[in-house]
Image (tube, rainbow, N blue to C red):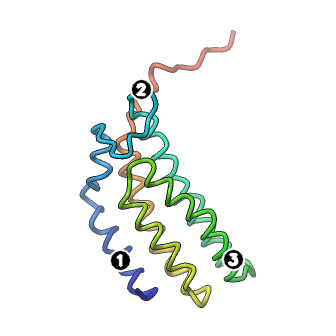
Amino acid sequence: MSVDEVIKRFEEEREKIWFEQPAEVRDLGNGIVPRNTGSRGQYLSTIIFAEGEARTMADEMLWGLIRVAEDTQADLPTLQAIIKEIIGYKADFFDFVSLPHAASLIHLYVDTACKCTTLDELCRLSHAALSYANRLHMWVDFILPWGLGDGFRRVKPA
């Protein structure tokens, strides 16, 4: 697939989940964990890890990569090496937390980023991936049982 075809794919994937929760996220929120991750038979830790991975993928990795690519004199091969090493690892972790479709899209991003021939292509691709990743993060954040935090109130200083 060309860079433009992959950008279109990310746009389509984002639109698909704009108003409808991805099935794999819904399943995770309901305790359906095909990778059997989570300690002692629970899946809360899997949701916590999925939320952290989705947040850092969007807010740190892709956003930071775009800022560096657009605002500095970074060279394409260095950015591609970072993408392959760090974001490639994150893709595998998305699979580990039972989000295999998201993992496949992140792997597609990595593979396509490594084929980009200009910084402009890489930036356009990264913006499309960021838009998808942001929406995915919102859905994963939605299934996190935030109310559990009430059981862990800070101790007031004396």
Residue 137 in percent (x, y) is at: 43, 54
Q: Is residue 50 above or below residue 92?
A: above
**Which mark is nearer the camera, 2 or 1?**
1
* Residue 71: mark in rendering: 3
Residue type marked 3? Asp
Residue located at (43% from left, 47% from top): 97
Residue 90 lies left or right of residue 132; in this view the side is right
**Which mark is nearer the camera, 3 or 1?**
1
Q: Which residue position is annotated with label 1? A: 9
Of residues 138 and 6, the one nearer the viewer is: 6
Residue 63 in percent (x, y) is at: 58, 65
Graded by Cα atoms within 10 Å as few (under 14), some (14 to 19) or many (20 or more), the crowding at tag 3 reads few
Q: Secondary structure at mark 2?
A: helix
Query: Which of marks 2 and 3 precedes in the sequence?
Result: 3
Residue 145 in percent (x, y) is at: 38, 33
Graded by Cα atoms within 10 Å as few (under 14), some (14 to 19) or many (20 or more), the crowding at tag 2 reads few
Q: Is residue 44 above or below residue 93?
A: above
